[in-house]
Image: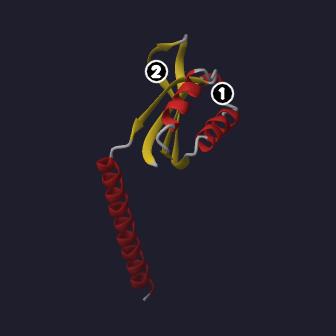
């Protein structure tokens, strides 16, 4: 299984009811033998240029692990799916994953330090 990043632009009319379209994509990934590692909804954004007469799209990003043949199957299916305006599936860069993990660890350490300082100040105020 290899790691991939899947970016999908959904039709803006689905803003109020995106769940069926998301379920369709998730089912497609799982039936292809893949596993969703992370998903990030980015919300509704203006497009740089109109696509099929649409000025806006709903952005959604997935980090997935897929077998070798799955990206082609997913690509073929998403290409004919009405809810999807555009999609892009690329192999994940391992250096990016390391950088994200390091950033998250650094943020967690900073939050822990800030929490400890807060509790120290609270204890001093009580005394």
Residue bearing the label numbered 1 = 14
Task: Measuring from the top left, give residue 7's x and y in whole percent.
Answer: 48, 34
What residue is shown at x 52% (from left), y 38% (from top)?
70
What residue is shown at x 50% (from left), y 31% (from top)?
72
Give the left or right position of residue 77, taking residue 48 as reference. right
Task: Measuring from the top left, give residue 105's x and y in whole percent.
Answer: 36, 63
Q: Quadrant of residue 44?
A: top right
Task: Measuring from the top left, give residue 103's x and y in whole percent.
Answer: 33, 56
Give the left or right position of residue 53, taking residue 108 as reference. right
Residue bearing the label numbered 2 = 47
109 or 68, which lies in front? 68
Q: Residue furthest top?
A: 53
Label tally: 2
Is label 2 in contact with label 1 (beta carbons under 8 Å)? no
Q: Secondary structure at mark 2?
A: strand
Establish if 104 lies above or below 70.
below
What residue is shown at x 36% (from left), y 61% (from top)?
107
Closer to the N terminus: mark 2 or mark 1? 1
30 or 103, which lies in front? 30
Give the left or right position of residue 1, taking residue 106 as reference. right
Mark 2 and mark 1: span between their CA atoms? 16 Å
Q: Which mark is residue 110?
A: none
Q: Residues within 10 Å of mark 2 (few under 14, many from 20)?
A: few
């Amino acid at each position: 299984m290899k790691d991939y990043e899947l970016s999908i632009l959904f039709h803006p009319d689905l803003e109020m009811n995106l769940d069926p379209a998301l379920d369709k994509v998730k089912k497609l990934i799982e039936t292809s033998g893949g596993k969703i590692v992370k998903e990030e909804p980015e919300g509704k954004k203006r497009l740089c240029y109109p696509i099929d007469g649409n000025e806006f799209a709903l952005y959604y990003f997935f980090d997935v692990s897929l077998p070798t043949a799955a990206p082609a199957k997913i690509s073929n299916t998403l290409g004919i799916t009405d809810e999807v305006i555009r999609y892009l599936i690329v192999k994940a860069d391992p250096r990016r994953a390391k950088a994200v993990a390091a950033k998250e660890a650094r943020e967690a350490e900073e939050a822990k330090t800030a929490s400890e300082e807060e509790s120290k100040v609270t204890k001093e105020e009580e005394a």
